[in-house]
Image: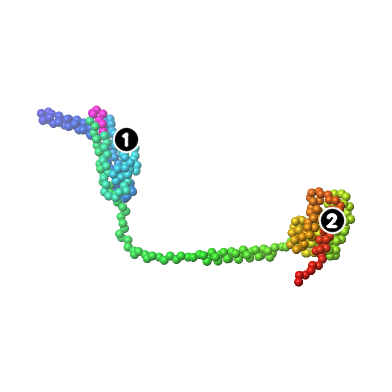
């Protein structure tokens, strides 16, 4: 081997050794974006890839803020680490968006690589990528149209509709009320089978009551119950009304409505209320008081039966 060949070999070995040292000490950082033109509010993927010799460096990855000039950070992925052929690869994807229209550059982020066998740190910056942010393009191909004239709005007055509807409802309600009372069955009058007049019948029955012996409670109760039944039967037949199921209070109101004098109404009230006391309170009046009740009822019946003078 001649002198020149030896010298060439030495230079080649030195170059190879120098290249390996340079590779070990020179990590690389690459930056990618999935698109360079977006509409306002759309998103762009900003990807950072760093490679270096495995075990030669300790990395200090950049911290991303929530927002940078003209951009908002939507999302940031975890830093993925892969090792192949003694080369370590670190990857992170940052999702950006922008609400400012214009042509903007992403910031350059610094990644520090600290050599394991050297004190000199290496800082490598990511590339600043240009992103065009714009609005949706206006469709100029569509035909321009004239502005439509103002439309007249017709205001409807519904007052008369409401009035008409109210009148119709009142007519319908009035018809049903009329129909109800027209077809309402009147309570049938009690059937009284008697061949003599109401007055004669009442007087005969009262005379029969006077024959009872007023010495025991049962007879006294029968006596006063009979007085009330005879008087109600007389009124029902005489005036063609049904008062058989009326109470003493109802009977007195009925007499007052028929314009009977106050003394007659008072006499009837005394007789009937005495009968109520006997029937419900087990009151046992003296014989004279019981006979007085029949007398008062007779007088009331006679007054009702007697003809009344006509007003001139």
Judge whether 121 appears above or below 285 on screen. above
Provide the secondary structure element on which disc 1 rests.
strand
Mark 1 or 2: in front is 2
Q: CA distance from mark 1 to mark 2?
A: 126 Å
Tell me the magenta residue range: 113-119
Q: Name the N-terminal-most of marks 1 and 2.
A: 1
Residue 227 rendering spot, x and y as whole percentages = 83, 56
Q: Quadrant of residue 186?
A: bottom right
Specify the color scheme.
rainbow
| Residue identifier under label 1 | 81
Few, some or many residues within 10 Å of mark 1 (<14, 14–19, 20+): few
Q: Quadrant of residue 203?
A: bottom right
Provide the secondary structure element on which disc 2 rests.
helix
Q: Residue at x 74, y 57 (%)?
A: 250
Residue 129 rendering spot, x and y as whole percentages = 26, 44
Q: Residue at x 79, y 69 (%)?
A: 309
Q: Nearer the viewer, residue 169 or 14?
A: 169
Q: Is residue 9 left or right of residue 311?
A: left
Residue 188 rendering spot, x and y as whole percentages = 75, 62
Q: Are marks 1 and 2 in contact (CB under 8 Å)?
A: no
Judge whether 38 appears above or below 79 on screen. below
Q: Is residue 131 left or right of residue 254?
A: left
């Amino acid at each position: 081997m001649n002198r020149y060949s030896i010298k060439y070999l030495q230079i080649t070995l030195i170059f190879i050794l120098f290249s390996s040292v340079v590779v070990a000490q020179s990590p690389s950082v690459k930056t990618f974006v999935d698109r360079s033109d977006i509409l306002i509010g759309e998103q762009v993927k900003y990807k950072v890839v760093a490679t270096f010799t495995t075990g030669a460096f300790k990395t200090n990855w950049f911290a991303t803020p929530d927002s940078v000039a003209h951009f908002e950070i939507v999302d940031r992925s975890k830093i993925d680490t892969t090792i192949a052929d003694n080369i370590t690869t670190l990857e992170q994807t940052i999702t950006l968006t922008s609400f400012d229209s214009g042509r903007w550059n992403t910031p350059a982020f610094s990644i520090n690589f600290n050599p394991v066998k050297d004190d000199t740190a290496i800082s490598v910056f990511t590339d600043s990528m240009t992103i065009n942010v714009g609005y949706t393009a206006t469709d100029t191909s569509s035909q321009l149209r004239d502005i439509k004239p103002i439309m007249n709005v017709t205001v409807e007055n519904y007052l008369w509709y409401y009035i008409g509807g109210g009148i119709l409802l009142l007519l319908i309600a009035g018809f049903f009320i009329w129909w109800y009372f027209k077809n309402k069955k009147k309570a049938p009058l009690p059937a009284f089978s008697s061949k003599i007049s109401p007055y004669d019948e009442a007087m005969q029955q009262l005379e029969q009551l006077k024959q009872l012996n007023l010495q025991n409670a049962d007879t006294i109760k029968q006596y006063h119950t009979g007085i009330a039944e005879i008087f109600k039967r007389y009124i029902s037949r005489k005036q063609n009304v049904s008062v058989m199921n009326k109470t003493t209070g109802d009977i007195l109101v009925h007499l007052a409505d028929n314009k009977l004098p106050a003394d007659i109404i008072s006499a009837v009230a005394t007789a009937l209320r005495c009968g109520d006391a006997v029937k419900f309170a087990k009151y046992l009046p003296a014989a004279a008081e019981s006979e007085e009740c029949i007398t008062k009822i007779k007088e009331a019946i006679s007054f009702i039966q007697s003809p009344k003078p006509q007003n001139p």
